[in-house]
């Protein structure tokens, strides 16, 4: 991908989406965010409101009940939502860029009618189940099996760390059908909540994004109809990698939002807090922190938008998405740590929000491919 066609001139629609997400975050997400983090929950009512606002199916074509928006709009919305609540935004990211995108890009018309339409409106929530207890980064070594039984698959195995795991209706489950074929023997099956033999494990107690529910999933002889396979036999790994390319743009934008949210709080606080007779913003040590944060955030934003534009312009975006995620997640870590520092002791308590943002930042370096995996992806693209 080159810098050709790079145009950061936002349209009216882009700005309207950004404003809508900013308003929604302020009016709906902010008030309970500390309690949701502390008590590890996210009310259905808020999920419903995010659906009504169109955030859960932003990029899905209107034909299937989505917003028909581009990836740039998605990045702008993800940044705004993530400034306030990264647990809400991960739901938006998984539903949009893994589940809905995967179904729209690779599903059959019947699959889209049955599964995509309710997901795009937020009536249903989706989950994407690739990781296993022993297959995270090493995603091709799937232990979950989907045995071909003629007109159905027999699904057995365990998935780990599944976002929306406890509340989803539709699960895209990756499993091995032909072990002798390696990653080319893997399939992706659409599994419905409540299918016989499908059990949802306990909710994880996490460092960050505590409002988001993360569960293990257990499958014991679950019969999944053949028509629920996405793409041709053996397409499952390619499916997972292709959807993750776009997912990584969503998580990069989430990291950007966590960073910019923390920066905005630190900037404001530095003008209010006085020490040694003047606002701390007048101490050069604090100014340098702010300058560093703002510069890093702008660079992260450019990378996120470049990746989004590559996708919107139908360019290859494997590398630009991985670069955006690698860089923005580091910026999220660095910025949130400094935002806590600028707040002093107040930064260490919950009321001031920056300690939560610091905890939330860490996951952006781990999920949808760790930073080490992003470097592998980038290097392979550079060297191919
Ligand atoms: N886009 C498209 N295809 C890709 C791809 C990409 N980014 N990366 C790999 N592939 C394809 C390769 O082309 C290859 O296909 P062919 O053999 O048909 O050409 C196939 O996938 C296997 O690739 P490799 O031979 O490179 O396999 P590998 O085992 O050496 O490495 C990996 C693969 C890149 C490390 C991959 O396993 C990976 O991305 N791991 C990280 C997994 C991950 O991101 N998990 C996220 C789970 S979802 C999640 O986390 C959601 C959430 O939190 C909210
Ligand atoms: P490992 O793969 O065991 O990695 C351990 C360490 O080794 C990491 O630092 C890693 O970068 C490094 N490492 C591994 N291989 C290499 C290598 N070749 N070179 C250099 N370093 C390497 N998964 C889903 O499928 N769906 C979800 O919805 C989902 N949501 C998640 C939500 C949360 C809150 C969490 C914590 C995880 C979620 N995941 C999900 C799983 C996530 O994608 C994995 O945790 C991640 O891919 C890393 O896998 P792992 O935990 O097995 O770590």
Image (cartoon, helix red, strand yellow):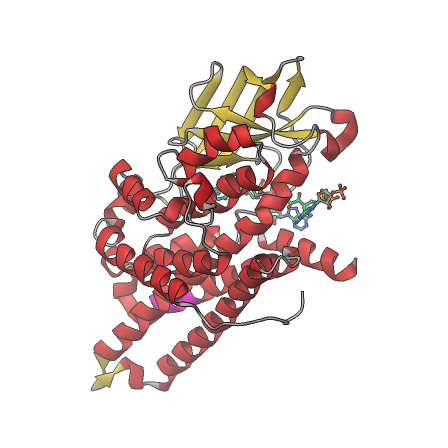
What is the x, y in percent for residue 238? 67, 40
Work out whether 246 lies above or below 224.
below
Which quarter of the figure has residue 322? bottom right
What is the x, y in percent for residue 201? 44, 26
Image position of 100 (left or right of 91): right
Magenta region, main secondary structure:
helix
Residue at x 47%, y 73% (from the top left corner): 9
Taking depth in this image into account, of 86 and 354 the one nearest to the observer is: 86
Which quarter of the figure has residue 337? bottom left
Residue at x 54%, y 16% (from the top left corner): 220
Work out whether 24 lies above or below 104.
below
Q: Is residue 273 visible?
A: no
User: Magenta stretch: residue 334 in it?
Assistant: no
- Give the total of numbered labels: 0
Residue at x 68%, y 58% (from the top left corner): 378
What is the x, y in percent for residue 70? 48, 56
Work out whether 308 lies above or below 363.
below
Work out whether 317 lies above or below 240.
below
Image position of 363 (left or right of 229): left
The quarter of the rendered structure image containing the C terminus is bottom right
Taking depth in this image into account, of 40 and 175 the one nearest to the observer is: 175
Q: Is residue 342 visible?
A: yes
Image position of 84 (left or right of 310): left
- Give the residues in magenta: 335-340
Which quarter of the figure has residue 186? top right
User: Magenta stretch: residue 339 in it?
Assistant: yes
Ligand 1 image-quadrant field: top right
What is the x, y in percent for residue 48? 29, 40
The quarter of the rendered structure image containing the N terminus is bottom right
Residue at x 32%, y 61% (from the top left corner): 354
Taking depth in this image into account, of 212 and 177 the one nearest to the observer is: 177
């Amino acid at each position: 991908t080159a810098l050709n066609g790079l145009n950061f001139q936002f349209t009216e629609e882009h700005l309207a989406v950004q404003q809508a997400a900013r308003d929604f975050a302020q009016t709906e997400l902010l008030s309970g965010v500390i309690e949701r983090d502390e008590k590890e929950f996210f009310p259905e009512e808020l999920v419903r409101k995010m659906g009504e606002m169109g955030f859960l199916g932003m990029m899905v074509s209107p034909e299937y009940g989505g917003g028909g928006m581009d990836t740039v709009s998605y990045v702008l919305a993800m940044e705004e939502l993530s400034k306030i609540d990264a647990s809400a935004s991960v739901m938006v990211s998984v539903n949009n860029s893994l589940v809905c995108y995967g179904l729209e890009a690779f599903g059959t018309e019947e699959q889209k009618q049955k599964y995509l339409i309710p997901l795009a409106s937020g009536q249903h929530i989706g989950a994407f189940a690739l990781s296993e207890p022993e297959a995270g980064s090493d995603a091709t070594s799937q232990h979950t099996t989907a045995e071909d039984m003629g007109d159905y698959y027999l699904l057995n195995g365990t998935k780990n760390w599944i976002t929306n795991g406890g509340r989803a209706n539709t699960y895209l489950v990756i499993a091995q059908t032909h072990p002798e074929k390696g990653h080319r023997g893997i399939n992706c099956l659409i599994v419905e909540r409540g299918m016989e033999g499908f059990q949802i494990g306990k909710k994880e107690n996490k460092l960050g994004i505590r409002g988001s529910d993360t569960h293990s999933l257990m499958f014991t002889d679950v019969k999944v109809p053949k028509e629920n396979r996405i793409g041709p036999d053996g397409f499952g790994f390619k499916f997972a990698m292709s959807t993750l390319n776009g997912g990584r743009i969503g998580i990069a934008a989430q990291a950007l939002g966590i960073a910019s949210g923390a920066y905005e709080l630190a900037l404001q606080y530095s003008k209010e807090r006085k020490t040694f007779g003047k606002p701390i913003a007048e101490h050069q040590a604090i100014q340098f922190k702010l300058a560093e944060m703002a510069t890093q955030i702008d660079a992260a934003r450019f990378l996120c938008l470049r990746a989004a534009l590559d996708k919107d312009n139908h360019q290859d975006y494997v590398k630009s998405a991985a670069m955006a995620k690698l860089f923005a997640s580091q910026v999220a870590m660095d910025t949130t740590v400094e935002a806590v520092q600028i707040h002093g002791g107040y930064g260490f308590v919950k009321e001031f929000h920056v300690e939560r943002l610091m905890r939330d930042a860490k996951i952006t370096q781990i999920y949808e491919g760790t930073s080490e995996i992003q470097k592998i992806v980038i290097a392979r693209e550079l060297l191919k």
